[in-house]
Amino acid sequence: VQLVQPGSEMKKPGESLRLSCRGSGYSFSNYWITWVRQMPGKGLEYMGRIDPSDSFTNYSPSFRGHITISSDTSIRVAYLQWTSLQTSDTGIYYCARHSRTSGNVLDAWGRGTLVTVSS
Amino acid sequence: DIVMTQSPLSLSVTPGEPASISCTSSQSLQHSSGKSFLGWYLQKPGQSPQLLISLATYRASGVPDRFNGSGSGTDFTLKISRVEAEDTGIYYCMQTLQALLTFGQGTRLEIK
């Protein structure tokens, strides 16, 4: 099982960004993909998730309206998207495979994408 | 939201000695199945988190048996029977009972 994410992205405030997370080694449609943020030197925060089989999404109230999560099962990729980045979006963004068994655990993680938003 | 509270927030342990981390949830994490939806994760320096324990007590594949999870309801504990140098990092508990997943603040384990 692998989740592959780009290593880093550098953007300016107000710009848009779409992060990718490509799954391999398992049946992509059978597991949710969850996105987790880690701001510099801080802990882990749940952002939201998607069920690739029907594109149903769930967002944390802290992020709803600021991000969009989507997926494309034909190429086994999940996305995390912003239309207008803020400097406070700087951080590492992890995607994780969210198992619907074993207590809904996040049982495999990508290496994370470091997003830097700076003018 | 379910609030997860860990203690201590940091600890320093000599190799070969035991370590224990507590995690308390603001609501019971017991599912209708009778199991508690609580997981433990370790984030090693410069790495992404990795699953250690699921359903409060089940060790994930490949996790050494010196790691043990216990507890139910609202009170949980992760114990490392004999700490090794490779165990350094930040340990997080996380509840998955509610759709809005929530993490503890993290406990930093330093090896003396």
Image (spheres, rainbow, N blue to C red):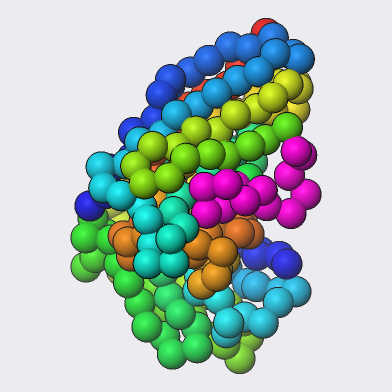
Q: Give yes or no for residue A115 being in the magenta stretch.
A: no
State which quarter of the image contains the C terminus of chain B. Answer: top right
Above/below status of B75 relative to B51:
above
Q: Is residue B44 left or right of residue B76?
A: right
Residue drawn at (67%, 82%) of the image: A27
For the magenta stretch, what is the residue range? B53-65
Task: Give whichever of A85, B63 is nearer the camera.
Answer: B63
Q: Is residue A45 visible?
A: no
Compared to B101, does A80 lie above or below?
below
- Residue B16 as seen in the image, left or right of residue A51: right
Residue A78 position, x and y percent, is 52, 75
Q: Is residue A56 visible?
A: yes
Residue A2, given in percent of the width and then of the height, sits at 71, 65
Examine the rendered structure and indicate whether residue A116 appears above or below residue A35: above
Q: Residue A86 in the image: state x and y as whole percent.
A: 28, 51
- Residue at 25% x, 42% y is B26
Residue B37 falls left or right of residue B42 = left
In terms of depth relative to the viewer, which is nearer, A19 or A31? A31
Q: Main secondary structure of the magenta part?
A: loop
Residue visible at 66% across and 48% down in the picture: B59
x, y percentage for residue B38? 46, 50
